[in-house]
Amino acid sequence: MKSTLPLFAALALGFGISEGCLGADEWHIASAPLLTPWAEQVDSRNPLPEYPRPLMERKDWLNLNGVWQFQEARVGDAVPVDRKLDDVILVPFPWESALSGVRKQFDSRRAWYRREFTVPQSWGGKRVLLHFGAVDWEATVYVNGRSVGMHRGGYDAFSFDITPFLKRDGANELIVGVFDPGNDIGIAVGKQENSRFTNPQRYSYCPSSGIWQTVWLEPVAELYIADFHAVPDVDARQLSVTVSPDLLVGDLSVEVAALNGAEVLGKELGKPNMPIIVKVPKTELWSPGSPKLYDLQIKLFRGDQVVDEVKSYFGMRKIAIKRYVINGRDGLMKLELNNQFLFQFGPLDQGYWPDGIYTAPTDEALRWDIAQMKAWGCNMVRKHIKVEPQRWYYWCDKLGLLVWQDMPSTFKKRTGEEKTQFETELQRMIKSHWNHPSIVNWIAFNEHWGAYDVERLTEMVMALDPSRVVTGNSGMDAGRPHIDYEVGHIKDNHHYRPPTNPMASSRRAAVNGEYGAIGYNIEGHVWDTDGPWVHYNYQGREDATAEYENFARQLLKFRDEDHLSGAVYTQLTDVENEMNGYFTYDRKVEKLDRERVRKANLALWQDSSSVKETNIINPTDGGALSMPDEDTARRKRQ
């Protein structure tokens, strides 16, 4: 297989290299109805080699992605210490995916993962953290036969300090036991449906079990920076940064510096766990038209000695709602970005891939989706009941795409324990992503799915992150028009063919959180040729594009004559049996006329604000997968 990033290039850029993938030659991609163009670029010896956490970067790390030993597990199994497993799997692809090489769903819903790794000699004297980007759903981790911890939650990163369990010389054995109950219980699962694996249909898709984001090792000092929270204040031209060390001792201090390349914009010294205010008067505001990012350098001192240092970035932007007079009606709320009304428009994005399901085949594929949304004239995306790897949000930050972020939910009624788990995961999602300038809206529930205590949980999210707007329930009239929750910042209705406009509100900005679903089938690019399909009501590209333009004109009327602040078109790509994308599920065919759609999309928002789009990313001339050589080379240098 061809690698997207040669090993020498990875070393030169400081990226971690996968540690000796055992049995790499035994892995083969499994058959699947469709594959994306990036499937053939997956390198089994070094999959997804990019640094997985761009918002908090240290120079030393070791990527553990690659071919691991693997087999189904059963309740009561002994931990397979020092025992070769029956099969192999390519981490970090879910075991139901083609790229995993397994593509099975197990009756037990359980599996074992096993591999070995060696700690680099240069890490001597350092503590070693074992990081998991995400594992769906319960992961129990063993190092050299000893349990180091357990984590529950399918969408959030977690780590363990494995220093006491390591052999500093020679091979270390890592075993992960995974249990994924799926939607058998009331946990956050999003669109996954266990029973759909052999017969996917309608609005639910294949499950995505096991390790599905990067696994990696990182050396840290005895005292180190565990986390930080950066909040821009556009009006005061300053940045508030709160840095949390893993352990609080009396003589610690923190230095925060904001930089524009080599230029220091501001630098301040302060205490851990206390806001440090850095004045940044010379900064340019971040927006979809000009997604300017600045570097952030954080140092942890003990006395006068630097004990840890991380690099990050930030964008100066403000999201808020404000009262407007609209057609003589005073007090209607509208969304603002950087103190100006900006109509926010973009597609619903499920984040599914036919070859990797929850996991994009390559980082280039991940970036491509975001670049295409920009190229089609969108300034926003709604990430629909899924949480992505950090690099997805990094590309939204860098390319300039606003994000409405859903919390994954469930159709089931929750028990008290499951409610506690849900609220824990909701807070983790926010705290682990709130440094991304692209994210402007948290969505607690979708269409009443598994909804409970909506007022309380919406207010909890608002209090947890006052720097963003919050939607309590997206889709107030989706099948249950009598239910609304007068809470949060956004009033959101869903309506398919045509879009509709929520009733005016003096408390919340109004948006159409889902509309569209203009779809048809293209032979050779259909996941399930037997159906049943949804949203395939149109005859072809011309018919579908004309309807798209018609809907865009209706949205313009809602925006200009009333109070509409945003809209979400369903959707970016076809997904399994939903046939309503800009692209087919394999990303190989554009289903609508790109230039006509782009023109309609830009008309919705470019003249709604003085912020003009000056940074359209790679709008391609018909070849949906074409990439300029210089653009590709530049991305590899970043």
Image: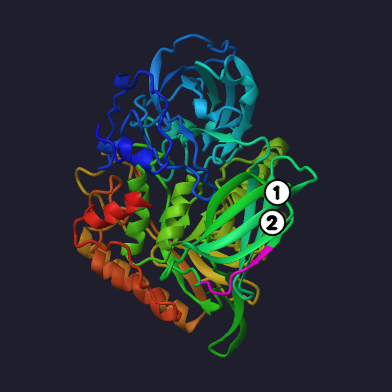
The residue at the point 49 percent across, 32 percent down is 215
Callout 1: few (<14), some (14-19), or many (20+) C-alpha neighbours within 10 Å?
few
* Residue 312 location (% of width, % of height): 53, 53
Q: In the image, what residue type sits under mark 2?
A: Leu
Which residues fall within the magenta stretch?
277-283
Identify whether 215 is placed above or below 563: above
Identify whether 85 is placed above or below 551: above
Q: Nearer the viewer, residue 443 or 300?
A: 300
User: Residue 77: within the magenta?
Assistant: no
Identify whether 429 is placed above or below 84: below
Q: Find disc 1 in the rendering and name its residue.
A: 304
* Residue 625 location (% of width, % of height): 23, 52
| Secondary structure category for the residue under label 1 | loop
* Residue 581 location (% of width, % of height): 32, 54
Can residue 114 be seen here? The reply is: yes
According to the image, what is the colour scheme of the structure? rainbow
Callout 2: few (<14), some (14-19), or many (20+) C-alpha neighbours within 10 Å?
few
Identify whether 576 is placed above or below 499: above
| Secondary structure category for the residue under label 2 | helix
| Quadrant assignment, res 596 | bottom left
* Residue 524 location (% of width, % of height): 20, 42
Q: Label 2 near label 1: C-beta < 8 Å?
A: no
Q: Find disc 2 in the rendering and name its residue.
A: 464
The label number, if any, that marks residue 351 in the structure image: none
State left or right for residue 402 relative to residue 587: right
Q: Nearer the viewer, residue 464 or 326?
A: 464
- Among the two numbered marks 1 and 2 on one chain, the one whose residue lies closer to the N terminus: 1
State left or right for residue 407 relative to residue 48: right
| Quadrant assignment, res 246 | top right
